[in-house]
Amino acid sequence: MSACMDARNAITIAEVPCPHCGKPVEIFDKDGKYAVNSVCDNCGFVFQAGEPSTLHNPGIPCLKGN
């Protein structure tokens, strides 16, 4: 049973293209949601923690950073 919990709590690190500028952004995915905020270094787009991850749900928009 503990192996199931370990898998559920695992964080996947991946690079995905920024939906605004296309540059790669490193994201941290946990259970199909962003585990932390990730910001595009090129244009400032923010992948918000807690929102559905584009890793598993391509096409979901992101929010522009301040």
Image (spheres, grey):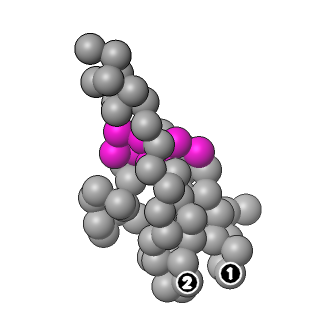
Percent position (x, y) of residue 55? Answer: 35, 60
Locate residue 32: give its quadrant. Answer: top left
Q: Which residue is mark 2?
A: 23
Residue 15 rendering spot, x and y as whole percentages: 49, 69
Q: Residue at x 46, y 77 (%)?
A: 17
Mark count: 2
**Does the residue at mark 2 contact the one at mark 1 (Cβ under 8 Å)?**
yes
Q: Is residue 34 magenta?
A: yes
Q: CA distance from mark 2 to mark 1?
A: 7 Å
For residue 19: magenta? no
What amino acid type is highlighted by mark number 1?
A: Asn
Q: Is residue 12 left or right of residue 42?
A: left
Vertical position of residue 51 compared to residue 61: above or below: above
Residue neighbourhood size for the residue with mark 1, other residues' Cα within 10 Å, grouped as few (<14), some (14–19), many (≥20)? few
The residue most toward the top is: 1
Give the residue displayed 34% in from the left and 16% down from the top.
2
| Front-most of residues 62 and 8 | 8
Q: Position of residue 39 (x, y in %)?
A: 65, 63
Residue at image coords 32%, 23%: 3
The answer to which of marks 2 and 1 sits earlier in the sequence is 2
Q: Quadrant of the N terminus?
A: top left
Q: Is residue 18 left or right of residue 41?
A: left
Residue type at numbered disc 2: Lys
Residue 51 seen in the figure: no
In the image, residue 64 above or below residue 3: below
Specify few, some or many for label 2: CA neighbours under 10 Å numbering under 14, 14-19, or 20 or more: some
- What SS does tag 1 mark? loop
Q: Nearer the viewer, residue 7 or 52?
A: 7
Which residue, given by chain and number where applicable, does mark 1 sit on? 42
Position in image of residue 66 (x %, y %): 73, 62
Stretch in magenta? 29-36
